[in-house]
Image (cartoon, coloured by chain):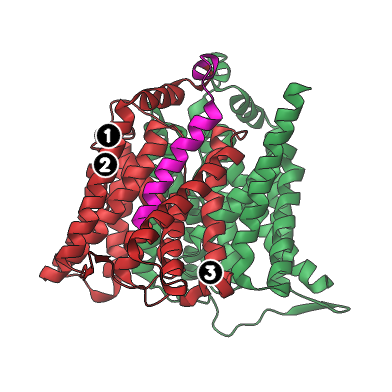
Chain colours: A green, B red
Amino acid sequence: MSSQILINGIVIGALYVMLALGFSMIYTSTGFFNLSHGAILLTGAYVSYAAGALWGLGFAASVVIGALAATAIHVVAAAGIYLPMRSRGASMWIMAIGSLGFAIVSQAAIGIVFGTRTLNIREGYVAPVLQVGEVRVSYIDVAIIAISVVLVTATHQFLQRTKTGIGIRAAMADRDMAQAVGIRVRSLELLVFAIGAFLAGTAGGLYALKGAIIYSMGGPALLKSIVVSILGIPFGLVGVFGGGIFLGVVENVVVANWSAGWVDGVSLLVLIVFVWLTAVRARVRKYR
Amino acid sequence: MFAFVIHTAIIFTIFLMLAVGCNFIVGYGGLFTIGHGAFYALGAYAAGLLSTKLGLGFWPGLAAGGVVAAAVGGALAISLSTVDEDYFSLATFGFGIVTFTVLMNWFSVTNGALGIAGIPAPTLFGLEIESGVPYLALVVVAAVLCYGGVWLLIRSPFGRVLQAMRDEAAGVAACGRNVVWLKSVCFAIGSFIAGVAGVLYAHYATYIDPTSFTVEVSILSLSMAVVGGLGTLAGPLLGAVVVVLAPELLRFVDLPAGSAGLIRQGIYGGLLVLTLAIRPAGLLGRRTRGG
């Protein structure tokens, strides 16, 4: 494996980590698979595109605007649709399908507004490149890795150190008990949703900077969030980091050695084997 | 116009069969599958390959498609029997995507993205069942048989044990029933119906390629069952009307040509959100089931 493939995998993996951390936080705190997670990335990417390409804002400003817009839309969706569904007795997967419906609407809306062709935030723009020996890394790639590390670490510190973060973790561990001791679980859930959406929206903006975007990119992004979260959840933050980088590198190796068509199949196969092994391990422990 | 109505009716009936099979697995068996489209694909490809490569007729192909889907479905359910509920759903979801990837890339067998062309129209007593009204009749008969089969099954002792397992698996196991076997048979029956639907689709379209069997088909099957009301008999029918037929009606409204498909998609998503936000148990469901 050449080091170029490795570094490309790490850059993509850094985006996956941001997606997956948000996804798994929302999953552990509200207890449902937010299938509109890919749509958050999509919204972030397209609003960033609009800000950068149509309104002529700088790279940093467009990413921030994209992330904030995506966060706002999806927090409203959570407060207005998903959480009320749960109080009406919807099960986890019913909520998931509801969020999927929202994702479908988002995708259709973006397709109608921006068209279904691939778009580039700066047509023909080539980012300056850092050359280290054989390996070439663009400055945007470096920025992606840096932003991912900073945001993910900040989220982790927030959860570990602050009072609000501890409240969120208490609500994740036992919702009813947290409510009983006076923690405002519902507003914390919305906060978690906002953090997760912000991470995914930022990933979307960075994705728009990195390359072409298309209205159907939400589905694949959702897939990555799910795979990395499931790989990572049992091992905490290190697991999410490891899972994201692992998936990014595996995908790049698959693309380099076989063909791009096998990528999703291979990553989902990794997921199935992992889920199955976890279950087998649990079974073995139970009988020992 | 008339041809278009018949075409829509045929596709609607095939999707209805997917919804019926999915409702059987999710609504009555409590196994939340998100990979139903994979078995639809297996049926279609089994029929396509058998008829074009081996020259087998429609009827043996119909049986083979159903049996292949049922066997793979049963095996999948057994191999995932140790996996918890949420992860079971995820694994079926993964199975759907892996199936699609294999269809797309295993060029020597499935012909990849080029698909399989020239699947012959079915014959009955030497007469060809033409596409159009005769084919619609065939599909409707198949759908009615599947619906009737499910109706009989859920009223049978097997069906009652199945629903008991959905509500309280540990209790059923404690009564001496083999829960793994029950789950597997339930999954196999639902997959069989999907496989048959796939065979009917393959012989109707005469050409199949992987794009007809994406994850969206799995999700569509599930949405129909969920919107109608899981674990109700009329649920899949109502769900299919809302999810498949309602967006189709828009064809009769003048829409800008470029975005008509997207607007239909948006309405499908909107209906999904709305129904579930207002009635989480589905239109006909009394209480939330599954998941």
Q: What's the mark number on residue B104?
A: 3
Q: Residue at x 65, y 60 (%)?
A: A266
Q: Are the residues under badges 3 and 1 in a single subunit?
A: yes
In this rendering, would B8 be left or right of B90?
left
Q: Which quarter of the figure has residue B257?
A: bottom left
The residue that mark 1 highlights is B151
Q: Residues within 10 Å of mark 3 (few under 14, many from 20)?
A: many
Mark 1 belongs to which amino acid? Trp
* Residue A79 visible in the current orientation: no
Q: Residues within 10 Å of mark 1 (few under 14, many from 20)?
A: some
Q: Residue at x 24, y 33 (%)?
A: B284
* Residue B77 visible in the current orientation: yes
Q: Is residue B285 magenta?
A: no
Mark 3 belongs to which amino acid? Met
Secondary structure beneath dot 1 equals helix
**Cα distance in 3D space between marks 1 and 2:** 6 Å
- The extreme right residue here reads A133
Secondary structure beneath dot 3 equals helix
Query: Toward the viewer: A262 or A202?
Result: A262
The numbered mark, 3 or 1, whose residue comes first in the sequence reads 3
Spot occupied by residue A75 in the image (x, y as percentages of width and height):
45, 43
Tell me, yes or no, whether the two marked residues, 1 and 2, touch with CB atoms within 8 Å: yes
**Cα distance in 3D space between marks 3 and 1:** 36 Å
The residue that mark 2 highlights is B147
